[in-house]
Amino acid sequence: MYSIGEFSRVTGLTVKTLRFYHERGLLEPAAVDPASGYRYYDERNVQRAAVIRALRDLEVPLDDVAVVLADCSDDVDLVEYLGRHRHTIAEKARHYEDLLAKIDQVVTAQRKTEEATAMRDQVFEPCEREIEPQLVAGVRFQGKYSDVGPVFGSLARQLGRHIAGKPLCLYYDGDYREDDADIEACFPIRKQVPVNGADVRELLGGRCVTLLHHGPYEQLGRSYAVVLKYARDHGYDVALPTREVYVKGPGMIFPGNPKRYLTEIVLPIAEPASE
């Protein structure tokens, strides 16, 4: 017979664990001294402890360990249970893979905005540049400008790891609309994927006048005045839809500070009519 300390050394299980297994009815000592309450273990306990430890190494839940000990006496008896247990582990693995992808998405998005955020104290001026075509998934709707948040949220949940850039809105109106603005909320994506309720297509590129706005969305009007004046002074006609690219806005977890938001206003330059 082994004392609980000796049995702990033999099995590699702590005294605390042995007491816990006794309380759960998984590993009953061979004898318990009624006067002192000391536990004593024999060779059969050694074998049972080895089985319990092997099952726990496979992360078999304690409730299932009790069932296995009651129903199985050989590895052959374990095959059906281990098949079910493997399926459960595989489901958990897929869950954690998805979770890792979401964490990577948050971290990558934040790192990509660090450089842009570092420019927040600069004076931004309009500029002309060529933008490349890009594959996007977009949801077009009519409503208030403030309605884009939930649309972006729903779209992001569907796209997940396929998102390949900053969110943007396409505005199909040439003027400000109170309640019925024609808007398309988009995410750049890496490849063609089916998305419920979204249009997946290549967004055309071309020459544009752009301006990076620093500050809350409510103050975008003053930046629009600057970039529209630039286009007018250079004799450019603006083509619809115009774009807003949200370089830094509300985070995926925290809303962030609106004073630090960065929004790129993109006004496509209309091609001159052919004669």
Image (cartoon, grey):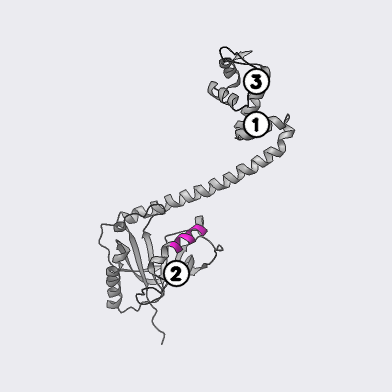
Q: Residues within 10 Å of mark 1 (few under 14, many from 20)?
A: some
Residue type pointed to by label 2: Glu
* Residue 66 disc label: 1
Residue under label 2, please give it: 184
Query: Residue 53 falls in which quadrant of the image?
Result: top right
Q: Residues within 10 Å of mark 3 (few under 14, many from 20)?
A: some
Residue under label 3, please give it: 46
Q: Quadrant of the N terminus?
A: top right
**Of label 3 and label 2, which has the lower sequence position?**
3
Determine contact: label 1, label 3, CB under 8 Å.
no
- Residue 160: x, y in percent? 50, 56
Residue type pointed to by label 3: Val
Of residue 151 and residue 29, the one placed in the foreground of this image is: 29
Q: Whole-Å distance between the Cαs marked 1 and 3?
A: 16 Å
Q: What are the residue bounds of the magenta stretch? A: 150-158
Residue located at (63% from left, 29% from top):
54
Residue located at (29% from left, 69% from top):
221
Query: Residue 36 falls in which quadrant of the image?
Result: top right
The local secondary structure at tag 2 comes to strand
Query: Residue 73 falls in which quadrant of the image?
Result: top right
Viewer-nearest of discs 2 and 1: 1
